Every structure is written in structure tokens, then in C-alpha cells.
Amino acid sequence: MWKIGFLEKRKVAEGTKIYSFDKPDDFQFTEGQYIEMELFNVKDPEVSHDSKHFFSIASSSCDETLDFLTRVRESKFKQALDSLVRGDKVGISESEGSFVLEESGLKNSDGEILLIVGGVGISAARAIIRGVECHNEAKYKESLKLLYSNRSVESAAVLDELADIGWLDQSLFFTRRVSRGSLQEVYGDKIDAIRVYEERIDSSHFKRLTNDFDNARFFVVGPPGFVRGMKGVLLDLGVVRDYIFSDSFAGY
Ligand SMILES: Cc1cc2nc3c(=O)[nH]c(=O)nc-3n(C[C@H](O)[C@H](O)[C@H](O)COP(=O)(O)OP(=O)(O)OC[C@H]3O[C@@H](n4cnc5c(N)ncnc54)[C@H](O)[C@@H]3O)c2cc1C
């Protein structure tokens, strides 16, 4: 286990924050992986689950901090996380997980990648996108497209940050309960960099976004219901299981 010090938190959407910690020099991870975090300040934990949670790492390996993005809820864990002050230590496991772009098996730009994200799944997606940006990975900049679905504009995290990433200009933001006007109110002109659909993600979007659908790879991340639903759509479309990579955030 590693002990890392809390640095700061910032709000990135309604009820959603990024928590930043110092990163040990020799801590290794690949963008898209997760850790198990243990908090030492949980009041009267009844079960071990009250003090330990899995989190995807939301920062890239180039970033100086280890970031985690989460919805702040009433659970003992989340309340303890939110009460950390600068310098407090938490424990984290080694990084694990195979939700990483290398798993796609794509060598050059010989296949497109759709990163299909539901809500809080943006934590892992943020790390992946920042990783592609900072490692300047041309093959992924050309082939990766993001579909980011949220219940509302208020709950959509880091959309402004994504709008700053030029090569993501094919990306799509989906929501059913918001107009382009209200997005503009929150994010200003930045939102022009992102295409907004007031509809649910469905099979037509996958086909429209890919030039070579049969050779595309699909990375799906978010709450279990979202991941199940998206995988179902992809399998119905005839996508082979080996081309679907997913990370399901149990607990949502
Ligand atoms: C690989 C992985 C990566 C994750 N990454 C993130 C992340 O980046 N950001 C994020 O916010 N969350 C992530 N999660 C989910 C996170 O671990 C918490 O479960 C979630 O944030 C809810 O915590 P809570 O304290 O709000 O609710 P809790 O009180 O912990 O849980 C709410 C409900 O879900 C149930 N539950 C909780 N955990 C599990 C579980 N593991 N299996 C089955 N049921 C469960 C509880 O029994 C309860 O009914 C990830 C989970 C996994 C497995």
C-alpha cells in the first residue's frame, strides 16, 4: 500500500469534485487503471466497505498529482473523503485494470476507437484523454472519439476542460434534458468546440462516427446500468466481444 497526502479539492459539476493528492515518484500506472483507496478518518466504520473504495485515477501519468473524480454523497466514505485537509494521508493500492488503450491491439491508425462514457465514468476517460494529449500519441489523436452522456448539464464534469482539447473536436456530448442554450450559459463559447445532442446514445451514433465500423474498438465506462446497456447495443450490432473493453463503476 502507498500512503499519499491530500492536496486540494475542486468542484467540477453539481455534487461532483476532483480530489488531488501528491504522487509518489515511483508510483506507476497506465491511464484508465484504478486503485483501491483506504481512508483512515472514517467515523465508526461498520464494514470494511465504509473505509475502502475503488477509484479510477482521473489524472494522466504526466500530471504532478493523482486525481480522483467522484460524486459526493452521504456515505461514510464520501463524507470522510470530503473532510480531508491538506497533508492528511490516505492509503492506495497498486494500480490495476485493463481498461487501457493499449489493450485495443491497434498499432497505428488502423482502427477507430470510440470512448463511450456515462456520467462519472469521465474520471477514467479524463485520464485517458489527458494521457493521449501529454504523450502526444498521434495514432490515438486521429482515431479516438468521445461520446459523453450525462443526465443534465449541471452534472456533466470537466466538459470545459474537454472543449479545450482540439483533437477532440469530433466529440459528442449527449444529454436528454438540456438545450444548447443552457450549456452555453454554463460553459460560454467553449461549448462551440463540442457537438451537442439532446438525445440518448444509440446505434446510429456509433455507425455515424466511424468510417470503418467493423474494425472499430469500443471502450465503455460508467455506472453498471450504462455499461450494460451500451454493451448490449454494441453486441446487437454484431460487434465482436474482443473489440469491446469496459469498466463498470459498481456502487452507482
Ligand atoms: C473499477 C472501479 C472503478 C471505480 N471508479 C470510480 C471513480 O472513478 N469515481 C467514482 O465516483 N466511483 C468509482 N467507482 C465506484 C466507487 O468505488 C463507489 O462504489 C461509488 O463511488 C459509490 O460510493 P458511495 O460511498 O457514494 O456509496 P456506497 O455507500 O459505497 O454505495 C452505494 C450503494 O452501492 C452498493 N455498492 C457499493 N460498492 C459496491 C460494489 N463494489 N459492488 C456492489 N455494490 C456496491 C452499496 O451496497 C450501496 O447500496 C469505481 C468502482 C469500481 C469497481
Image: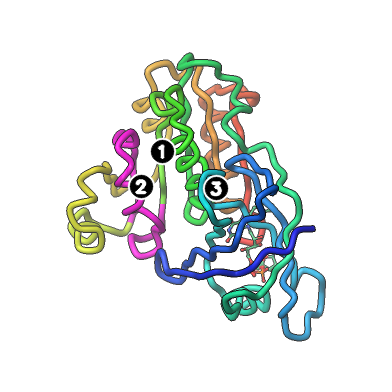
Instruction: Give the image quadrant in which the ligand numbered 1 is located.
Output: bottom right
Q: Earlier in the sequence, mark 2 or mark 1?
A: 1
Cα distance in 3D space between marks 3 and 1:
12 Å
Q: Is label 1 within 8 A of ligand 1 (CB to nearest ligand atom)?
A: no
User: As rendered, which of 165 and 97 lies closer to the eye?
Assistant: 165
Q: How is the image coloured?
A: rainbow
Q: Secondary structure at mark 1?
A: strand
Q: Residue at x 36, y 61 (%)?
A: 152
Q: Residue at x 20, y 46 (%)?
A: 192
Occupied quadrant, residue 154: bottom left
**Image quadrant in which the C terminus is located:** bottom right
Q: Is residue 2 left or right of residue 159?
A: right
Q: Is residue 182 left or right of residue 116?
A: left
Q: Is residue 235 magenta?
A: no
- Residue placed under numbered mark 3 in the picture: 124
Type of amino acid at the residue the image marks with label 1? Leu
Q: Earlier in the sequence, mark 3 or mark 2?
A: 3
Cα distance in 3D space between marks 3 and 2:
13 Å
Label ID, residue 162: 2
- Residue placed under numbered mark 1 in the picture: 146
Q: Is residue 159 magenta?
A: yes
Cα distance in 3D space between marks 2 and 1:
10 Å
Q: Is label 3 within 8 A of ligand 1 (CB to nearest ligand atom)?
A: yes
Q: Which residues are magenta?
A: 150-176
Residue 208: % across, % down = 34, 26
Type of amino acid at the residue the image marks with label 2? Leu
Proximity of marks 3 and 2: CB atoms separated by less than 8 Å: no
Q: Residues within 10 Å of mark 1 (few under 14, many from 20)?
A: many
Q: Eyeballing the image, is 124 above or below 113? A: below
